[in-house]
Each structure stands twice: as structure tokens, then as C-alpha cells.
């Protein structure tokens, strides 16, 4: 999908108009952002907005996140375990220390593989 | 007007007058009826109202119009932004919104706010071109590799083809270097754009706050004059409405123009008065009937 974020009143207004006129291509609307379908029509609408407001429109390509295919089991398990922690004020760093869970630095150092 | 003292000549009418010149005909006065002048060249009412507002337009000479003129300068049936028009009338009467200082402060902050550019088009295009070039060079290398192999298998001298292959391999290596550099430049630009977008986001917040403050100001100003304008609505000829909000656009415009003293002429495209003089008297403003 295409994530379109606007940074000015004019760009926000035009995004709103585009969303109103092309419901079939707009997957989701947020305040000043929207998700367009990953079709050429979605790209066409995004390009039009970008053409009109080059500095005030950000377009990113996104795809659904599946934690079972996109992230290692270790990451998933660490998240589940941390959310089930006994002491809510424990920061993750301390929580992970001395366990098999990855520490924050190694989580940050590893990219998600796009072709996973 | 009060009559002059006996024995003295009548005081000249000091109220603003206008001069309208269309083609080679020129008309002066306080109330000008273009509709009755068959020899006057036709001019669209909107163009005439625009000429009133344009100090450089020689077709109409008159006092300079205030901001309310934009809403009431042409009396016709177009939709009217009611709240804005009421606020403009209030300003023309000298009212000022209580949050004016805040609006000015926000305007100053916004004027100082100049976020840097955030357009990555050039960087994206460079990456795309460099990537396409790498693909092209790879294909060339593959082609020459195939040719060298075929020549060798045929037992023919392949030295020219080998030289071509080496040149192609070197071009591919250059293309790959350029592609990597373009990717890095794009990554740097993205980082920079992120900061620029943060600045734009703050500007957007400022703009929203300013718009809200201006809306509040309009609401407050409109409330100050609503009663006065409602009274003018009731007094407007051919009007059955009792409030500004329910009045038709022609009535609403006439009522606003009557509630405020206008020096610049009102262009009348609607017929509510027996003649332009009566309209001008009722409005207490110069008037042009088209």
C-alpha cells in the first residue's frame, strides 16, 4: 500500500478531496494521512499530490506486517513475555538482561529482511 | 441633510461621488444608472464591481473600498459567506476582536517559520536512473561473456571480444558504484527531509491554531453586529426575512451595506428600489445600477 502523509493545509485539503472522490482506492483515512491501494491508480493519485505539493507530501510504500513471517520467533516471544511481566515499571533492557530475550541494542542493529 | 442657513448658498454635497467612464461616455454623480443608458457599452456587473475595487482601473473613479466591499460591492444572488461578511461589517464599524493580539503573534510566528525544502525527487530519480544503468551494463556484460565463450568454443581468436568484455565489466563496476552512491545520497536526503517535515508539521500546527483563532474572532465580531444587521434586513424592501441568516443573498447584501457606511459604490444587479437614487439614499452609499 502507499502511505501518503501531508504537511500543509493545502496538501491536507487536497488529500481529503482525493479520498472523498476515490473511495475505491483509499484503503484507510487518518487525519492528514491516508493509505492508498497498491494499484497504479493509487500511484497516480499519490503522484498527483506530490506533483502539486512536492515538499508537503510524503509517500511511502508499505505492506501488511505478519509477525509470524516477518519477524523472528525470538522477537515475538520477547514482546509477549515483556507484556506479561510482573513489574510494569521494569524497562525492557533490565527485563531482558540475563535471559534469552534479545537486548535492545541487538534488536536495533538487525533489519527486518524484506524477502523473508 | 440639514438645510443651509438662510441667505447662504446650499452647502455642496460632501458625500462621496463617483465617476464612471465606459467607452467615450463619462457619468458623474452619487447614483449612476447604467441600465437606463442605452448608449453605454455593456459591462458585466462583476467586472464593474472589480473595477470599483481596483484603484488603477480608470473606468470607475471613487473612494477606496474597505474589506466589506468584497462581500457587498456587487448586490446579486450569489451565495454569501455570512459569518465572514458579518465580521467584515463589524471591522468596518471599528470593532476589533479580543484575541487580536494573539492572532498577530501567531501571524508573526508563522511569517518567521520557513521550513527547509523536503523534496527528494532529484535523489529518487538519481537512484532510479543509476539502478536502470546497472541493469543495462549487466546485460552487456552477459552478452559479451556469451560472445567470448562462443568464439572460444569455435576455436576463433576472441581477443577483441575479451577487450569488449573487460570494458563492459569496468563500466558495470562504475555503474554499481554510482548506484551505491545514489542510494547513500537518498538515505542522507531522507534524514534531512525528516527534519524538514518535522518543521513543516510544526508550521501546520501553527496554521491550524491561527485558523481557529481567526474563526473565533469572526464569530465574536459577527455577534457584535448581528442585531444591527437583522434590523436592516427587516427594513429591506421586498424582504420577508427577519434575520440576516435567513435572508436571501440580495437582502443580506443590502442589509450589510446599509448597516455600514460605505464610501465606495455598490453595484446593483438586483432590482429592489424604484430607481438608483432611491437605492443610494436607502443605502447611504454611492450606487451604480446595471
Image (cartoon, helix red, strand yellow):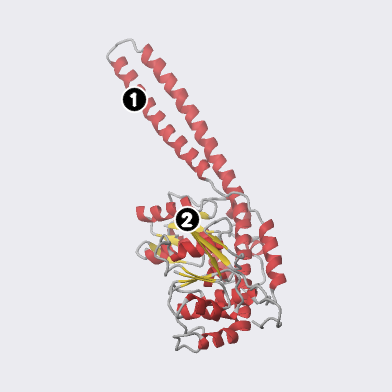
- Answer above or below: position of A28 versus B143: below
Circle 2 SS class: loop
Residue at the top extreme of this rendering: B157
Q: Quadrant of the N terminus of chain A?
A: bottom left
Q: Residue at x 44, y 72 (%)?
A: B269
Question: Crowding at label 2, few (<14), some or many (≥20) Cα neighbours within 10 Å?
Answer: few
Circle 1 SS class: helix
Where is residue B89? Give x, y as percent.
60, 76
So how many labels did they put on this image?
2
Label 2 belongs to which residue? B24
Q: Is residue B257 left or right of residue B140?
A: right
Name the chain letter of the residue that bears numbered label 1.
B
Q: Residue at x 42, y 70 (%)?
A: B36
Question: Crowding at label 1, few (<14), some or many (≥20) Cα neighbours within 10 Å?
Answer: some
Which of B153 and A7 lies nearest the eye of the viewer? A7
Point out which mark residue B143 bears.
1
Q: Is residue A92 left or right of residue A71?
A: right
Amino acid at each position: 500500500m502507499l502511505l501518503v502523509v501531508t504537511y500543509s493545509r493545502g496538501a491536507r485539503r487536497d488529500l481529503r478531496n482525493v479520498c472523498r472522490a476515490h473511495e475505491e482506492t483509499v484503503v484507510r483515512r487518518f487525519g492528514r494521512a491516508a493509505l492508498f491501494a497498491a494499484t497504479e491508480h493509487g500511484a497516480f493519485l499519490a503522484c498527483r499530490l506530490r506533483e502539486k505539493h512536492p515538499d508537503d507530501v510524503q509517500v511511502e510504500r508499505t505492506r501488511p506486517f505478519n509477525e509470524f513471517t516477518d519477524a523472528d520467533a525470538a522477537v515475538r516471544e520477547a514482546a509477549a513475555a515483556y507484556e506479561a511481566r510482573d513489574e510494569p515499571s521494569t524497562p525492557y533492557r533490565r527485563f531482558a538482561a540475563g535471559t534469552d530475550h534479545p537486548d535492545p541494542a541487538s534488536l536495533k542493529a538487525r533489519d527486518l529482511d524484506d524477502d523473508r | 441633510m440639514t438645510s443651509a442657513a438662510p441667505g447662504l448658498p446650499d452647502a455642496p454635497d460632501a458625500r462621496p461621488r463617483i465617476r464612471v467612464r465606459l467607452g467615450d461616455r463619462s457619468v458623474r454623480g452619487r447614483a449612476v444608472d447604467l441600465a437606463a443608458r442605452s448608449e453605454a457599452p455593456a459591462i458585466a456587473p462583476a467586472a464593474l464591481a472589480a473595477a470599483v475595487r481596483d484603484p488603477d482601473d480608470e473606468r470607475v473613479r471613487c473612494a477606496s473600498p474597505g474589506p466589506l466591499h468584497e462581500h457587498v460591492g456587487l448586490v446579486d444572488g450569489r451565495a454569501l459567506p455570512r459569518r465572514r461578511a458579518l465580521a467584515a461589517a463589524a471591522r468596518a464599524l471599528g470593532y476589533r476582536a479580543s484575541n487580536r493580539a494573539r492572532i498577530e503573534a501567531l501571524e508573526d510566528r508563522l511569517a518567521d517559520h520557513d521550513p527547509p525544502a523536503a523534496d527528494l525527487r532529484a535523489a529518487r530519480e538519481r537512484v532510479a536512473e543509476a539502478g536502470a544503468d546497472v541493469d543495462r551494463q549487466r546485460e552487456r556484460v552477459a552478452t559479451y561473456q556469451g560472445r567470448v565463450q562462443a568464439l572460444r568454443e569455435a576455436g576463433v581468436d576472441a581477443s577483441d571480444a575479451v577487450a569488449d568484455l573487460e570494458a563492459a565489466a569496468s563500466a558495470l563496476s562504475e555503474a554499481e558504484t554510482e548506484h551505491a552512491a545514489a542510494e547513500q545520497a537518498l538515505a542522507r536526503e531522507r534524514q534531512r527531509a525528516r527534519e524538514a517535515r518535522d518543521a513543516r508539521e510544526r508550521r501546520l500546527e501553527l496554521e491550524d491554531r491561527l485558523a481557529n483563532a481567526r474563526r473565533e474572532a469572526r464569530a465574536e465580531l459577527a455577534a457584535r453586529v448581528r442585531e444591527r444587521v437583522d434590523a436592516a434586513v427587516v427594513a429591506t424592501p421586498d424582504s420577508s426575512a427577519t434575520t440576516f441568516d435567513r435572508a436571501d443573498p440580495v437582502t443580506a447584501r443590502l442589509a450589510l451595506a446599509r448597516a455600514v457606511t460605505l464610501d465606495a459604490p455598490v453595484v446593483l444587479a438586483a432590482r429592489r428600489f424604484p430607481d438608483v437614487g432611491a437605492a443610494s439614499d436607502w443605502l447611504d452609499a454611492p450606487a451604480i445600477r446595471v
